[in-house]
Amino acid sequence: MLSCLRLCFLSIMALIMVACSTAQPKNINNVCDIYDEYYDWYNASKAVNERYGIPEAVTMAFIHQESKFIDNNRPARKWYLWIIPGPRPSTAYGYAQALDTTWEAYMADTGNWGADRDDFEDAVDFIGWYNAQTIKRTRIKPHDAYRLYLAYHEGAGGYVRGTYKNKDWLLKVARKVQTQASRYQQQLVGCRKDLERGWFWRTLFGFNDLSTAPPRVPHG
């Protein structure tokens, strides 16, 4: 009886978690499509740019690499004998794959004590905060996604010491992040105007698709 109740409880909790989860965007390789699907994400990443000076394209490229926009993403577990779950390699979690200790430092420094790693707005603010700290220590340019990602992975101290130099796999990943950031930036050039006017049409007419043309306003 107790085992049945426990199973029911776990099933209910799993359903609640799924219901509260945000689905991965349908096209994660096009930032215009992402913002079209989740317009509040544009506002969140734009706020990061205004607050910390980190371009939206860089922030979104970090999320693309770290979690593929899956809100509850974690590093894969080790498995023993294919059936026994082992520990995860780190405490990384959420959109930004922030570690427990780093997330706690972020909350303490910003006063954002209610922040959640699986909340997009909090996650992108964390990325902006972290990169801003890195820039202060290393003088990396805000648009330099390649070097910022190296420091994101190694820490600002590790970046200064050059701990990434013999990690060919990490250099390759950082180049991917830079390429993705450049792609996102080019895409934003084509849709930013629609995004900027989007808040009005969405609020007034309920549009959720940038491809939907706003109604013509009669003149005279």
Image: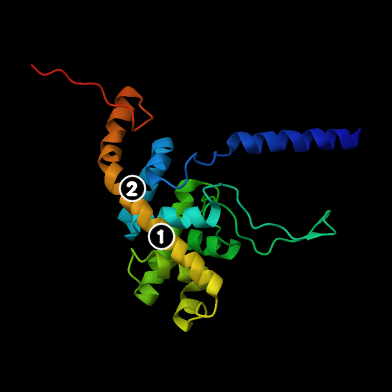
Furthest-left residue in view? 220
Mark 1 = which residue? 179
Residue 58 in sight here: no
Under mark 1, the amino acid is: Thr
Mark 1 and mark 2 residues within 8 Å of each other at the beta carbon? no
Q: Say what secondary structure mark 2 lies in.
A: helix
Give coordinates of residue 52: x percent, y percent: 34, 60
Mark 2 = which residue? 187
Horizontally, residue 107 falls left or right of residue 12, namely left
Give coordinates of residue 24: x percent, y percent: 53, 42
Between discs 1 and 2, the one toward the N terminus: 1
Horizontally, residue 26 falls left or right of residue 3, namely left
Horizontally, residue 215 falls left or right of residue 211, namely left
Q: Is residue 171 above or below residue 203?
A: below
Tell me which residue sits at (45%, 61%) in the image: 177
Under mark 2, the amino acid is: Gln
Give coordinates of residue 194: x percent, y percent: 28, 37
Residue 177 in sight here: yes
Q: CA distance from mark 1 to mark 2?
A: 12 Å
Tell me which residue sits at (50%, 68%) in the image: 172
Q: Is residue 41 above or below residue 54?
A: above
